[in-house]
Amino acid sequence: MNSDKDLWEHFKSNASEIDKIVGEQVLWWESAKASGGGINLYVEDIFDATKEAEYFEWIYKSLINMKKALIPHIQDYKNQGN
């Protein structure tokens, strides 16, 4: 049986394609207990209420793009017998 680290490696080996679909560079990390990836939005003031809609729009679009980027790779991973 494969572990989550195998899927993580599959994502990481396709990082440039995933980055292109997401529209940003995905930051991949690995530790003894968990691995993952994510993107960051750097803002000057996270508590600026006038930017709230903009921040939520970024989160929404980012999640949709991550889904578009990762679902085909998950299917490919499963099709390889994992």
Image (cartoon, rainbow, N blue to C red):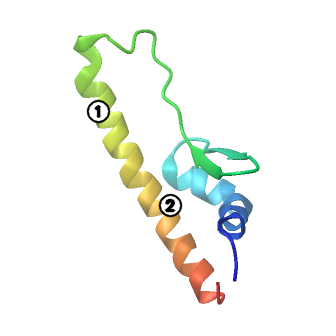
The kind of secondary structure element at disc 1 is helix
Rendered location of residue 36, percent (x, y): 62, 51
Looking at the rendering, which quadrant does residue 18 occupy?
bottom right
Rendered location of residue 7, percent (x, y): 65, 68
Residue at 31% over, 43% down: 60
Residue at 43% over, 62% down: 68
Rendered location of residue 17, percent (x, y): 62, 59
Residue 72 left/right relative to 19: left
Q: Amino acid at mark 1?
A: Phe
Residue at 28% over, 17% down: 51
Q: Earlier in the sequence, mark 1 or mark 2?
A: 1
Quadrant containing the N terminus is bottom right
Compared to residue 22, the image places residue 51 above or below, namely above
Label 1 crowd bin: few (<14), some (14–19), many (20+), radius 10 Å = few
Compared to residue 63, the image places residue 56 above or below, namely above
- The numbered mark at residue 56 is 1
Label 2 crowd bin: few (<14), some (14–19), many (20+), radius 10 Å = many
Camera-near label (1 vs 2) is 1
Residue 60 left/right relative to 34: left
Q: Amino acid at mark 2?
A: Ala
Residue at 57% over, 71% down: 73
Q: Label 2, on which residue?
A: 69
Residue 7 left/right relative to 46: right
